[in-house]
Image: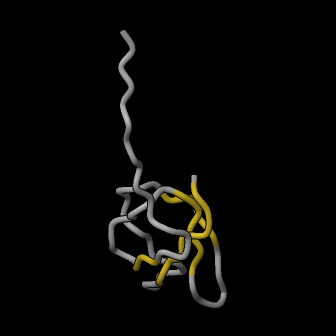
Amino acid sequence: MEIKQNFCIMVHPLGTTAKTGQTCPESGVWKVNSIPSTTAPIAKGNTMPPYSGQAVTWILISYA
């Protein structure tokens, strides 16, 4: 007997934004939406960090 399970994994789309202090909604590479900019790998559930001591908005640019 073979049992198959169907399931759907929901992911946040690329371009999703999160602000410093918020919980990261999706594991992946995030980019700061400011100048100067940087990228960082951030795992789902972690707190979005500040950049250069400032609160910033992060944009999801690729999945982990």
Residue farthest to the top? 1
* Residue at 43% in and 84% down: 55
Residue 8: x percent and y percent? Answer: 39, 47
Q: Left or right of 17: which side holds 45? A: left
* Residue at 46% in and 54% down: 43
Residue 11: x percent and y percent? Answer: 44, 58
* Residue at 47% in and 84% down: 56
Query: For residue 22, which quarter of the picture?
Result: bottom left
Query: For residue 48, which quarter of the picture?
Result: bottom left
Residue 59: x percent and y percent? Answer: 53, 76
Q: Left or right of 5: which side holds 53? A: right
* Residue at 56% in and 68% down: 30
Q: Left or right of 38: which side holds 60? A: left
Residue farthest to the front? 1
The vertical placement of 2 against 5, above or below, is: above
Q: Depth check: 11 or 37 in front?
A: 11
- Quarter of the picture containing the N terminus is top left
Q: Depth check: 12 or 46 in front?
A: 12
Query: For residue 44, which quarter of the picture?
Result: bottom left
Q: Depth check: 28 or 46 in front?
A: 28
